[in-house]
Amino acid sequence: MRPPARLEPPHLPDAFTWIQQPWGALLQCVPLARIAMHGWTTRELAIVGGAADCEPQWRQLAAAGGVPRDSLAAVHQVHGSAVIDVRAREARERPRADGLVSGDPSLMLSVRVADCAALLIGDSRRGAVAAVHAGWRGTAAGIAAAAVARLRDLHGSDPSDLVAALGPSIGPCCYTVGEELIEAFRGGRQNGVDLGRWFRHGEHLQLDLWTANRDQLEAAGVPGSAIHVSGLCTACHPEWFYSYRREGTTAGRLVGFIRGRQ
């Protein structure tokens, strides 16, 4: 479903802006745009159905990033914490993982979400980039910190040079979860973390993916001033974003993508 033309996109914090593409609005983080071509799609680029159904949209997305379709890299997402390095010859493969890193500016990295967070990271000095699918399982397992570690170990990135941004995802306002998730986070890589910052106890228990991933990035050495959160809840904006919680198995996918500057 495309939003009616009369609708205005949701209001954004100062660090984010809307960019018009041939298919419609594309969300960008202004500080990250200075070092990497990137963005998050909306329902206006309808990624719905099987791979063949969406091929025209994937081609549009590749064109927007200035790469051939074969240079748009993705993974078979499994809700884990594996982050892999990708090179040009591997771009058409889809290994089982939930994050990608690369130092090759001819490649555009992508992840797909429909309530989970699409985290994009760029290195302002070395040009390496990362795209991460951070659902609750990946967040519990520390996937944001894993991406920072992969950039450091494989591409020589200093975490203090990184800029990170979180696109639309289900917000703490709407992400009602069960008590068992607290135990899952305690069993993950969250030693010494005050989980009270991530879980809100009220009428229902709610998980704050935004704060959890921000805290993990800071703990990994990314400066707090270089971490940007769009604050757009996919469940609160049905005209613009897909939400698995709201739509179930019929939900399409939003895409977060990033490419290093040449």
Image (cartoon, rainbow, N blue to C red):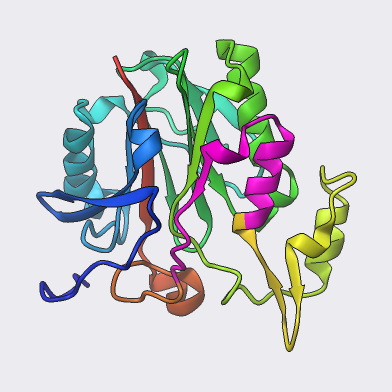
Residue 231 belongs to magenta span: yes
Q: Where is residue 57 shown, x and y percent of the image? A: 20, 48
Provide residue 98's location: percent of width, then percent of height: 56, 40
Task: Name the side, left or right, on which 121 lies relative to 20.
Answer: right
Near-viewer residue (205 or 31):
31
Give the total of numbered labels: 0
Q: Is residue 62 left or right of residue 96?
A: left
233 versus 162 height, above or below: below
Residue 129 vs 103, above or below: the answer is: below
Q: Is residue 212 left or right of residue 244?
A: right
Whether residue 151 can be seen here: yes
Q: Residue at x 44, y 52 (%)?
A: 167
Residue 219 location (% of width, % of height) = 74, 37
Work out which quarter of the rendered image holds the N terminus and state it: bottom left
Q: Residue extending furthest bottom? A: 203
Query: Is residue 184 or residue 149 the one in the foreground?
Result: 149
Where is residue 214 shown, x and y percent of the image?
63, 47
Identify the image quadrant of the C terminus. top left
The answer to whether residue 235 is above or below residue 142 is below
Query: From which residue to which does the magenta span run?
Result: 211-234
* Residue 138 in sight: no
Does the stretch in magenta take in 204?
no
Identified at 73% across, 89% down, the residue is: 203
* Location of residue 208 (image quadrant): bottom right
